[in-house]
Image (cartoon, rainbow, N blue to C red):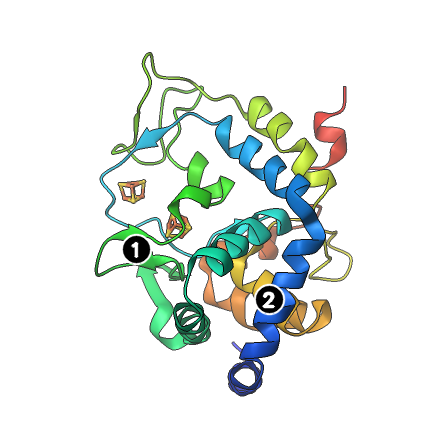
Amino acid sequence: MNEELLKKIKIAGAKNFDAYAQKVLEASANHGTFGMEMVDMLHDQLPRTSCANCGKCCNSISMYSLEYHRVMREVMTRWKPERVLRLIKSLLRFDLRQAQVGSESRLRCVFRDDETKVCLVHPVRPFACRIFGLLKENGQRECDNVKDLSLPEQTVKEEYLINLQAKILENSESFEPFEGKGEIHFFPFEFWFFRYLFSPERALQIYREILVPLSTPLTKMWEKQEQLPDILPSDYES
Ligand code: SF4
Ligand code: SF4
């Protein structure tokens, strides 16, 4: 991990808190309610579940740009400014957010409050959090503590999930983090945060030199990645 870059972004971030708040509001406003409604529709079409809320899976997850705006809109409209500033400060403390899951390194999700055991953005949490533990076609779940709230339990097919995301995919931003390895739409919250705080170029550098090395799943994904890792329009066009 690039420690020097990490130090620089902490200093620059501290100087830019007010500008960031303004930038993120403008960026969300540009999407209007259309994009936000699209995200809510996507989330509403998934089965509702409950779980033991142990928080083990609450490590930094990837999301679409529209989902980032949905989360930030919630935060900026409902939270007091001092709470937003606390969130930004804790986001920059990568040293405190590192977690070990078995033999793998992860970055804890900035929205998980481990003291009160809650997700601070639960009503607008991203797609990736919502599909974790859904009943798959092989009859299994990624977490055995997840239960469907409606009965009978609903099996979710991969094709169904791909189709659900089609509209979001068309309307979300994409970038190429590693030259020649293709563009992706799905980035950690932190990437989108820095994309609006600084610039897409700086956010991509932070993704490559800090976020990927901090996360074993992301490191592994890019090590073996020879082609586009994201869903392509051809995956859902008949
Ligand atoms: S889905 Fe499973 S691992 Fe994640 S918080 Fe719930 S019980 Fe814990
Ligand atoms: S957004 Fe909420 S549910 Fe998703 S990983 Fe973070 S704390 Fe967990």
- Give whichever of 72, 82 is nearer the camera: 82
Report the amino acid beneath label 1: Gly
Give the residue displayed 22% in from the left and 39% down from the top.
Answer: 52
Sooner in the amino-acid sequence: mark 1 or mark 2: 1
Disc 1 CB within 8 Å of nearest ligand 1 atom: no
Give the residue displayed 64% in from the left and 55% down from the top.
Answer: 28
**How far separated are the C-alphas under marks 1 and 2?**
23 Å
Give the residue displayed 76% in from the left and 19% down from the top.
Answer: 238
- Quadrant in the rendering for residue 19: bottom right
Identify the residue under disc 1: 102
Return the mark for residue 217. Answer: none
Return the mark for residue 207. Answer: 2
Horizontal side of 177 relative to 119 (left or right) equals right
Evaluate whether residue 203 shows in this view: yes
Horizontal side of 187 relative to 182 (left or right) equals left
User: Disc 1 vs disc 2: Cβ atoms closer than 8 Å?
Assistant: no
Q: Where in the figure is residue 211, as x and y percent of width and height?
A: 53, 66
Q: Where in the figure is residue 204, as x and y percent of width and height?
A: 66, 67
Vertical arrangement, residue 24 with respect to residue 155, above or below: below
Give the residue displayed 49% in from the left and 57% down from the top.
Answer: 77
- Give whichever of 153, 124 is nearer the camera: 124
Q: Where in the figure is residue 106, as x and y percent of width and height?
A: 40, 61
- Give whichever of 7, 11 is nearer the camera: 11
- Give whichever of 217, 117 is nearer the camera: 117
